[in-house]
Image (cartoon, rainbow, N blue to C red):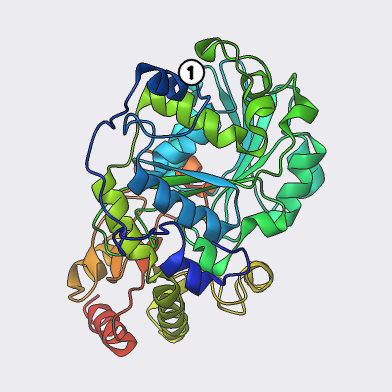
């Protein structure tokens, strides 16, 4: 697909380019394995001397077409689908870090990711230091160590909807000789392109807006191809030194800008196997075809809902980057001038019981763990998705005990507001 194609066209056309007589619509290659004529042909695939398909745990034509579409949307050189957004973040970090290594991350990130970085990776010998993303460059830089391998953040944090200053984070990361990894799930490449502001690797939970219909769980890793691993070869031996599991092959020397994704696929997916099924990739592609239509509607509806909530006397506070009094409004205008997402947070006057009564009174909006799909839904993170965090960790993550996360769908906005109004009348 030509680079000059615009996002709307890429959503529909990128990835699958059928040849004469092939299906116009991306087919589902629902097969675990692929046939070859000779043993030598298969051997070359296993030695990474030729590209091709031999086992779906590593590569599948359906998955690769969808990954290529996401890479085109983000402006990256290559991408890999995973079984979930959690798997995408884990693979990205583990592709760079090993036992004895360290990373730095913004505090206000999704609770599951926070737990991955703070608890699970620690069991593997990888430590993480969390920092306030709004702190100065000097203060954030103090968190780095000689064994720090990457800096991590989310373009729009979940559920705090804080906007990451990508350029600031990129400057810090590159001054320390490490890549910047950004989770772009909520903004999607329709509203934000982190690579244009210096990010090196982008991850996604495709479960959210990319799928858009809450039909399948998935993730994606996209590499910009811009980080010079060879410039810091001693820091990244996994990429820059021979891999004994592939007869001494060195990824950066053999694959150049494709080194990161090739290593993640041939090494981590081979050994850990968190693959996305071809069926789920097919459903994801259907969602991507309308991503450029849905995101503007999510943003339009959310802006109207946020402004309505802000004026309601029973609402204590509203956090949405589209509101001019939001502390990250200027960052939202800089990085996402077309809109941010459909997710916001707010608190009600009262206690936790007040929030519970409000949520239980909703009729159109559903109480679900999910977020960022076509249907309006609501959640109380302190009681649900982030309940594993302590009170102090909740505060550090920007999650107030009274915080209600509202994911505004693409229904008629007047119906959404009417539902919120009738529920507020009952508290």
Q: Secondary structure at mark 1?
A: loop
* Foreground of the two, 303 or 12: 12
Task: Work out whether 287 lies above or below 36.
Answer: below
Task: Work out whether 105 lies above or below 50.
Answer: below
Task: Work out whether 85 lies above or below 144.
Answer: below
Which residue occupies 33% across, 86% down? 413
The picture quadrant where one finds residue 356 is: bottom left
* Foreground of the two, 415 or 53: 53
Q: Is residue 28 left or right of residue 405?
A: left
- Asked if residue 8 can be seen in this view, the reply is yes
Residue 68 at x, y = what percent? 48, 52
Which residue occupies 49% across, 41% down? 393
Residue 126 at x, y = what percent? 55, 22
The residue identified by callout 1 is: 124
Dot 1, how many residues are within 10 Å of its Cα: few (below 14), some (14-19), or many (20+)? some
The picture quadrant where one finds residue 272 is: top left
Residue 6 at x, y = what percent? 56, 72
- Asked if residue 319 can be seen in this view, the reply is no
Indicate the quadrant containing the C terminus: top left, top right, bottom left or bottom right: bottom left
């Amino acid at each position: 697909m030509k680079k000059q194609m615009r996002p709307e066209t890429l959503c529909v056309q990128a990835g699958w380019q059928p040849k004469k007589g092939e299906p116009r619509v991306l087919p589902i290659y629902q097969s675990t394995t692929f046939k070859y004529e000779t043993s030598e042909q298969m051997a070359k695939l296993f030695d990474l001397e030729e590209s091709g398909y031999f086992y779906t745990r590593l590569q599948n034509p359906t998955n690769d077409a969808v990954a290529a579409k996401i890479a085109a949307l983000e402006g990256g050189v290559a991408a890999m689908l995973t079984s979930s957004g959690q798997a995408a973040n884990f693979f990205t970090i583990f592709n760079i870090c090993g036992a004895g290594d360290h990373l730095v991350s913004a505090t206000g990130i999704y609770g599951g990711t926070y737990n991955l970085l703070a608890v699970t990776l620690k069991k593997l010998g990888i430590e993480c230091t969390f920092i306030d993303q709004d702190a100065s460059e000097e203060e954030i830089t103090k968190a780095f160590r000689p064994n720090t391998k990457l800096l991590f953040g989310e373009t729009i944090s979940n559920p705090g909807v804080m906007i990451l200053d990508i350029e600031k984070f990129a400057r810090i990361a590159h001054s320390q000789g490490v890549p910047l990894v950004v989770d772009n799930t909520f903004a999607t490449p329709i509203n934000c392109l982190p690579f244009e502001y210096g990010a090196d690797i982008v991850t996604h939970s495709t479960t959210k807006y990319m799928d858009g219909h809450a039909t399948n769980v998935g993730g994606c890793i996209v590499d910009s191809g811009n980080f010079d691993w060879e410039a810091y070869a001693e820091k990244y031996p996994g990429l820059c030194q021979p891999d004994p599991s592939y007869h001494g092959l060195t990824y950066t020397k053999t694959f150049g800008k494709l080194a990161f994704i090739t290593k993640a696929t041939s090494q981590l997916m081979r050994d850990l196997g968190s693959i996305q099924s071809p069926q789920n990739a097919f459903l994801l592609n259907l969602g991507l075809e309308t991503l450029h239509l849905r995101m503007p509607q999510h943003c339009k509806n959310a802006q109207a809902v946020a402004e309505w909530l802000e004026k309601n006397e029973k609402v204590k506070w509203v956090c949405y980057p589209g509101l001019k009094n939001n502390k990250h409004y200027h960052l939202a205008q800089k990085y996402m001038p077309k809109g941010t997402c459909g997710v916001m947070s707010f608190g009600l006057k009262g206690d936790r019981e007040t929030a519970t009564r409000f949520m239980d009174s909703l009729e159109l909006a559903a109480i679900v763990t999910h977020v960022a799909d076509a249907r309006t839904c609501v959640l109380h993170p302190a009681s649900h998705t982030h309940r594993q965090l302590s009170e102090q960790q909740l505060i550090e993550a920007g999650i107030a005990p009274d915080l209600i996360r509202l994911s505004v769908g693409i229904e008629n906005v007047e119906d959404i507001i009417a539902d919120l109004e009738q529920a507020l009348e009952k508290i």
